[in-house]
Image (cartoon, helix red, strand yellow):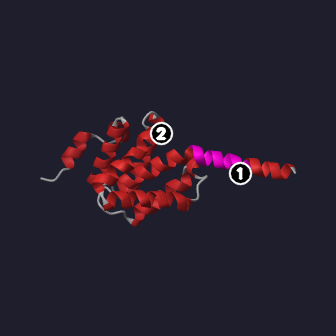
Amino acid sequence: MSGFLTNLKEQYDTLIERHHNLPFLKATMAACALVATADGEVSFSERVRVDQIIETLEHLQVYDPHEAVNIFVDFCEAIQSSPSAGHPKVLSQLDVVKDNPETASLLIRLCLAVAEANGKTSLVDQIEIVTLCSYLEIDPAHFGLYRTDLVDQLPG
């Protein structure tokens, strides 16, 4: 009987952890989707990078990777199908980390990882990440993103 109770408690603990971490999962997938769609197209390498993030972050390992990927895909589709409605909707998922600078910084580092998935960070991706920094009220300079550097990269 104690094996049954132990198993039941483990299942309960996992369920509680999933419930507790769901806002972080959604915020992570939203941040990744915002950067991945910044240039109008989600590349295969960006999708692979999101998979790597899901597999690497301990707080996300309680989820089936397909569940997390489905959230990411839903956010990407919302942004791409109607940018004016989708972008703010997806961006609002980041509200849960606004009051936690450590978690907000982690999300920005994850965004940088997605942006660099194609081998280099595009200007559009950098602008999106700087915008996310502003939204989360953290300094982009902490991540090597300087607004003057971005202006210097503008064509013309």
Mark nearest the camera among 1 and 2 is: 1
Q: Where is residue 115 in the image (x, y as percent from the top left)?
A: 37, 54
Extreme residue toward the bottom, this view: 44
Residue at numbered disc 2:
103
Residue beneath the point at 26% across and 52% down: 123
Neighbourhood count class around disc 2 (C-alpha, 10 Å): few under 14, some 14–19, many 20 upward: some
State the predominant SS element of the stretch in magenta: helix
First of labels 1, 2 by sequence position:
1
**Disc 1 on helix, strand or loop?**
helix
Residue beneath the point at 34% across and 57% down: 79
Residue at numbered disc 1:
11
Is 57 on the left-hand or right-hand side of 137? Answer: right
Q: Position of residue 120 (x, y in %)?
A: 33, 57
**Stretch of the chain drawn in magenta:** 10-20
Residue type (three-letter) at the residue carrying disc 2: Thr
Is residue 93 depicted above or below 46 in this figure?
above
